[in-house]
Image (cartoon, rainbow, N blue to C red):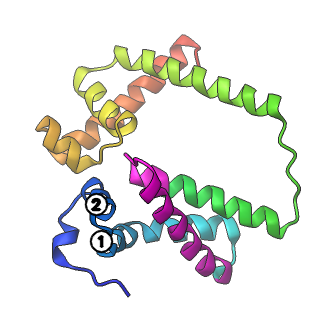
Amino acid sequence: MLSKKPKYNKLIDRELIELYKSSNDLNAVGELFARYSHLVVSIALGILNNEQKVKNTVQEIFEIIIETLRDSNVKNFNALVYSTTKLHCFKIKNESQKIDFEIDFDEVLEKELLLQNRITILKKSIENINHNQKKCIELFYFEGFCYSEIVNKTGFSIKEVKSHIQNGKKNMKSLLENSGSW
């Protein structure tokens, strides 16, 4: 079992990732896993509906994440955990139900183009919201910063950061709905 040391819980996710990548420090990864294990378990339970499968799956997911951390430049660990968990759980669920996947290239391409179009529309709509909201949303969603990192970069309080993100999303949604772009 990895020991949880006090110095690790003071580090932000990016610092823990860098520590792991630079010195192969498993305690840094252990801290990351401790922070996000509840997310992995809750998503896995929601998808698989089987506690025994979830126990095995959580271990597999963290092994995949360790390999990804080693080989990739991860900016947003939370997003990595979320997407890896969802994909792996659906893969297991589909295998257990013996569903065959026929990947239709045209369908995948169409969905990717639609997604790229929506990202472009979102980036345009962000130009029409309050400057502070824009800054916080860009740092959180596009740069992958966590709340505490945004606080350090902007000088806003944690409450202000959360408020700017929430209000910015609400304003963007309203703009998109009113323009008919969405």
In the picture, measured across the screen, residue 113 lies left or right of residue 67, that is right
Question: What residue is shown with label 2?
Answer: 22
Q: Residue at x 35, y 74 (%)?
A: 30
As drawn, 79 above or below 28: above
Q: What residue occupies the far front of the structure in this picture? A: 23
Q: Residue at x 29, y 84 (%)?
A: 3
Image quarter of the C terminus: top right
Q: Amino acid at mark 1?
A: Asp
Element assignment for label 2: helix
- Measured from the top left, where is residue 110 in percent x and y? 74, 26
Along the viewing direction, whichever of 133 and 90 lies nearer the viewer = 90
Question: What residue is shown with label 1?
Answer: 25
- Measured from the top left, where is residue 59 in percent x and y? 55, 76
As drawn, 68 above or below 111: below
Along the viewing direction, whichever of 67 and 75 lies nearer the viewer = 67
Mark 1 and mark 2 residues within 8 Å of each other at the beta carbon: yes
Along the viewing direction, whichever of 173 and 14 lies nearer the viewer = 14
Residue 33 lies in quadrant: bottom left
As drawn, 39 above or below 121: below
Specify start and end residues of the magenta stretch as a single range: 52-80
